[in-house]
Amino acid sequence: MPRLTRHFITGEELDRGELEALLDRALELKASRGDADAPRPLAGRSVALVFERPSTRTRISFEVGVAELGATPIVLRSDEMQLSRGESIGDTARMLSRYVHAIVIRSGSDETVAELAGAAEIPVVNGLTPLHHPCQALADLLTLREAFGRLEGLKLAYVGDGNNVARSLAILGRTAGVEVRIASPDGYRLEPGLAALDTEDPVQAVADADAVYTDVWVSMGDEGDADGRRAALAPYQVNAELLARASERAVVLHCLPAHPGEEITAAVLYGERSAVWDQAENRLHAQKTLLDLLVG
């Protein structure tokens, strides 16, 4: 499999060939999980998992994935490190580079991750920042590959807040040949030209789509404007009426955590067309492959 040069920060580091190879390998790792002779390509290595914010799927999928690859996961919260007492990001990166073989960081600052990657001598993976969530997008594409057997030519409609998840879907979806359409209200839209279609009309976005995707309306850090966000995004709920506008074969995606009754109805989230739980599981397999690509 081709080697990724160093970091994985926005998803733009992968070309189509590398992305396709990564997804192929992720499917292989998923199929072999639990086998006594499953590969452990990172045996003897260590990976630092740095979390500035609470995490469920990112922490668990990376911690389990690192262990299954044979490496040692070192989970670190920023308030447990000298970062909380004024040590610089650059010095932290230089120090970690002498101890571990890669760093995964979930941060509330894109600038922090960029500074960490600039100073580190080892690969740095963006576990989530305000602008990007590329590891989630890898899992999303893996889920679509499983559901449809291909990515080229698929239509994915993202409905709701034009956030980090939407941005990463647009970036990696374009690389994969997926037509990513994003429907968001004014004030919540991505920068122009990023998605194949950027509209305020959720019906237009969902028309004949192969996948319908949404995310929470109030993410961490948005609590101060919760009521305003809910009011603006209410017309973008993924419900049975909106899903009926998509292709008959369409699957439903959500990066979780979900708030049934807000961005998605319970009937759709837990319905027969939901691929949400496969999608959540695929964080593990996509990220294992990414680490093997970077470190193995």
Image (cartoon, helix red, strand yellow):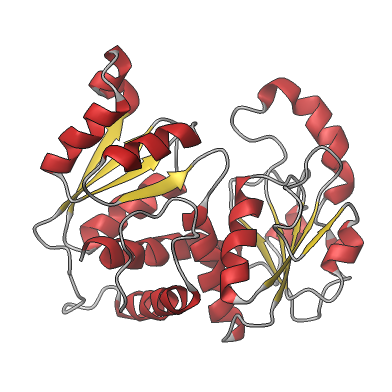
**Between residues 9 and 35, which one lies in front from this camera angle?**
9
Q: Which quarter of the figure has residue 141?
A: bottom right
Please tell me which residue is depicted at 28% across the width and 30% down the height of the picture. 90
Q: Is residue 288 visible?
A: yes
Q: Which quadrant: the C terminus?
A: bottom left
In the displayed orientation, state which residue is furthest to the bottom.
149
Residue in view at x 87 percent, y 71 percent: 207
Location of residue 180 in the rendering, given as x and y in whole percent from the top left corner? 71, 66
Left or right of 157 in this view: 200: right
> Residue 7: image x %, image y %?
35, 54
Q: Nearer the viewer, residue 30 or 266?
A: 30
Q: Residue furthest top?
A: 85
Locate residue 8, reporting x and y percent: 40, 55
Q: Where residue 234 sits: x, y (%)?
A: 86, 42
Up/down of 89 relative to 19, above or below: above
Residue at x 16% of width, y 62% of height:
70
> Can residue 241 be seen by looking at this rendering?
no
Taking 191 as reference, is 220 left or right? left
- Would residue 77 appear left or right of 139 to someone viewing this image? left
Please indicate whether residue 168 sits to the left or right of residue 268 in the image: left
- The residue drawn where x is 29% and y is 55% is 64
Image height check: is 193 above or below 163? below
Q: Residue furthest left?
A: 44
